[in-house]
Image (cartoon, rainbow, N blue to C red):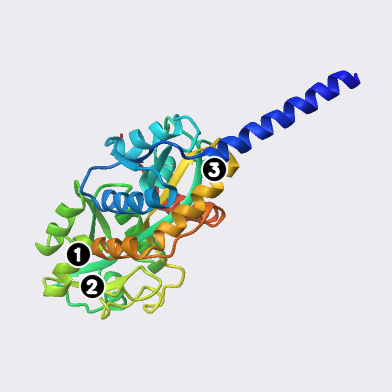
């Protein structure tokens, strides 16, 4: 019996030593960062910026690969099934990690079990905008108009179940108004419809709406950021309009396969947060209209649960169903 226990102890020590050595030896070859979206999009731009800074910190190349399809599911699934060795990462977004798990009956991965959240690295806060013909100047006036004309105002989205659909549905629920949802095939057609007067409201990103608001073609009535956007200082926050706990963003974060050794995970989390705080990356965020302070692994995990719970409630109360 003692002989068996001795051999078991030796084996456990050997395994622990092996893990420690692997952790110390990592990284010794290029790392892949998978972006589950098209090249040139905001997420791609941020991923390439943070990959460059992270690569310099770790002393190896961090290569961005785009895997497009199924609203980010294909790219996320690729990482979920990759070897958990620290050489394959996901530059994840809200759609594939929070919203789709709530809307789709089945996914090829389990976001809670198959991924290790390493760091949150950015927030794309949203702007509620109206066409300039609508006789409102801010969110309070818009809500008053909606209450005076139940069901007559339309809000657009880039597609059913997307973040700009859910943020408007959250407004409808919180304000107690009736508005009609008009889905479009993408954010750009929705923004164009808003300018053309087809719809009265759209909640979209600065990259979609900012320039048109600045030129006067559209009117920003509120932003979902915790403080006013630097690019649109005249547009009040939802909190200023009387809606507390209405900070909403399309967020970005880095994930690894769930079974990544803790030594590597800890090093990655700290390195990614440091990269996200770099001047180079912060400047890139401003270009695409992103903001926010990075969160390390534990903070990111807590945020993910809150994000999931919020949209689960909105989806259930709004009886939102994704047409497949």
- Residue nearest the viewer, comparing 6 with 166: 6
Which residue is the site of mark 1?
A: 209
Q: Which residue is mark 3?
A: 264
- Residue 225: in sight, yes or no? yes
Tag 2 and tag 1, C-beta contact below 8 Å = yes
Mark 2 vs mark 1, foreground winner is 1
Residues at marks 2 and 1, CA–CA distance in whole angstroms: 9 Å
* x 77%, y 26%: residue: 10
Q: x, y (%) of residue 199?
A: 17, 60
Picture layout, residue 208 above or below residue 29: below
Q: Using the image, tell me which numbered label, if any, was put on residue 220.
A: 2
User: Residue 229: x percent and y percent?
Assistant: 31, 73
| Residue at 35%, 59% in the rendered image | 167
Choose mark 3 or mark 1, whichever is in front: 3
Lower position in the chain sequence, tag 2 or tag 3: 2
Where is the N terminus found, in terms of image quarters? top right
Q: Earlier in the sequence, mark 2 or mark 1?
A: 1
Which residue is drawn at the image coordinates 27% and 35% (left, top)? 69
Quick one: 139 or 299, which is closer to the camera? 299
């Amino acid at each position: 019996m003692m002989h068996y226990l001795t051999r078991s102890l030796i084996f456990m020590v050997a395994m622990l030593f092996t893990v420690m050595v692997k952790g110390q030896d990592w990284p010794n070859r290029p790392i892949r960062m998978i972006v589950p979206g098209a090249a040139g999009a905001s997420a791609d731009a941020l991923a390439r910026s943070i990959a460059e800074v992270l690569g310099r910190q770790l002393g190896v190349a961090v290569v961005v690969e785009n895997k497009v399809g199924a609203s980010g599911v294909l790219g996320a699934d690729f990482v979920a099934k990759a070897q958990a060795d620290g050489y394959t990462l996901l530059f994840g977004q809200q759609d594939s990690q929070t919203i789709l798990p709530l809307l789709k009956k089945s996914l090829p991965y389990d976001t809670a079990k198959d991924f290790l959240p390493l760091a949150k690295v950015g927030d794309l806060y949203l702007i509620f905008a109206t066409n300039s013909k609508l006789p409102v100047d801010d969110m309070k006036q818009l809500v008053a108009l909606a209450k005076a004309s139940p069901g007559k105002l339309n809000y657009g989205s880039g597609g059913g179940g997307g973040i700009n659909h859910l943020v408007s549905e959250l407004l409808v629920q919180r304000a107690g108004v009736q508005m009609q949802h008009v889905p479009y095939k993408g954010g750009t057609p929705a923004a164009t419809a808003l300018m053309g007067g087809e719809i009265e409201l759209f909640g979209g990103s600065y990259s979609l709406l900012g320039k048109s608001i600045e030129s006067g073609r559209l009117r920003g009535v509120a932003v979902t950021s915790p403080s006013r956007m630097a690019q649109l200082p005249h547009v009040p926050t939802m909190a200023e309009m009387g809606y507390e706990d209405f900070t909403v963003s399309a967020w970005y974060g880095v994930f690894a396969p769930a079974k990544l050794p803790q030594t590597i995970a800890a090093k990655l989390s700290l390195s990614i947060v440091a990269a996200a705080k770099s001047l180079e990356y912060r400047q890139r965020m401003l270009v695409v209209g992103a903001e926010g302070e990075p969160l390390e692994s534990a903070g990111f995990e807590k945020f993910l649960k809150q994000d999931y719970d919020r949209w689960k409630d909105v989806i259930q109360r709004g009886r939102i169903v994704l047409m497949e």
